[in-house]
Image (tube, grey):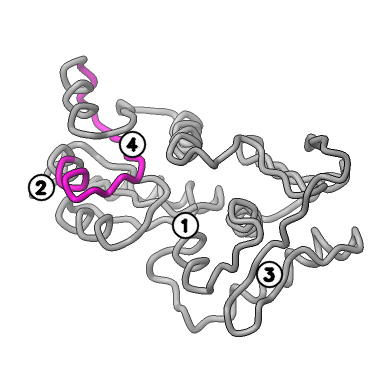
Amino acid sequence: MRLLLVEDDARLAVLLERALCEDGYAVDCVGDGGEALWLASENTYDVVILDGMLPGMDGLEVVRTLRARRRWMPILMLTARIGIDDRVDGLDAGADDYLGKPFEFDELTARIRALVRRGAGQRPSVLTNGDLVLDPAAHRVARRGVRIELTAKEFALLELLMRHPGDVLTRTFILEHAWDFAFDPSSNIIDQYIASLRRKIDRPFASTDVETVRGAGYRLRKVSDVDGSTVVAP
C-alpha cells in the first residue's frame, strides 16, 4: 500500500515514516501543504495522512482542494487540535477520519487499515485466492492451512497482487503502490521480490500462481476455492 505522509514536524515525520516502512508500506513524506497537494493530485495513494497545521497551505485547505479536484483517496487528519469543532471542521472539509496528537502508533495503523477497507467496496478484510489466504490486519499469510513467513515488503507485494487477481500489474503500477516515490524504476528489485514470493508461496506447494507476463508485468493467477470454503490463516 502506498501512503502520503504530510507532517511538518521533522522528528515526528522521520519516526512515522520509518515505522510505516517497517510495516511494509511505501511512504512518500513531505512537510508542506502545497507540495502535498501537488503529489496527491498527480499520484494515486491508498491513504493520505495529513497534519492539520502546515506552513503555507494548511491541512483543511489541502483537503478542500483535493475534494474539489475530485481526488477521493481516503484522508486521515492528524492534529493537536482535538476539540469537537476542530474535528467537525476537518470532517466537513472532506477528511475521512481524524486522529488527535499525541497518539499510539498501533491506533494509527489500525485506522489506516480501516480506511483502506472503506476506500473501495471490493476490499475485503481477508483476501483469498484459491487456497492462498492473506489477512492484512493480522499480517498473516497461509496456504492450505500452513503459515507462510514473509518480510514486510514481500507481504506488501503479495497483498497488491491479491487485490488484483488475474490482472496484469505493470512494473510502474507495482512501484507506485509498493515502493516509495523516489525509487529507481530501472532497478530489478521487483524481479527479486517476485522470485522470493515464488520460492515461499508457490514452490513448496507445487503451484505456479505468480506469473510473469512477458513485456507487460506480473499477475497472480485467479483461482477459485476448490470446495467453496475459506481457509483461515492460523
- Amino acid type at circle 2 is Met
Q: Which residue corresponds to the image point at 69% horizontal and 75% vertical from the top-left?
A: 212
Which mark sits nearer the N-terminus, 2 or 4? 2
Disc 4 on helix, strand or loop?
A: strand
Residue 219 lies left or right of residue 100; in this view the side is right
Asked if labels 3 and 1 touch by Cβ distance under 8 angstroms, the answer is no
Which mark sits nearer the N-terminus, 2 or 1? 1
Q: Which residues are magenta?
A: 64-83
| Closer to us: 212 or 190 | 212
Which mark sits nearer the N-terminus, 1 or 3? 1
- Which residue matches tag 4? 76
- Which residue matches tag 1? 26
168 up-or-down from 14: above or below? below
121 up-or-down from 181: above or below? above
- Which residue matches tag 3? 194
Closer to the camera: disc 1 or disc 3?
Answer: 3
- Amino acid type at circle 4 is Leu
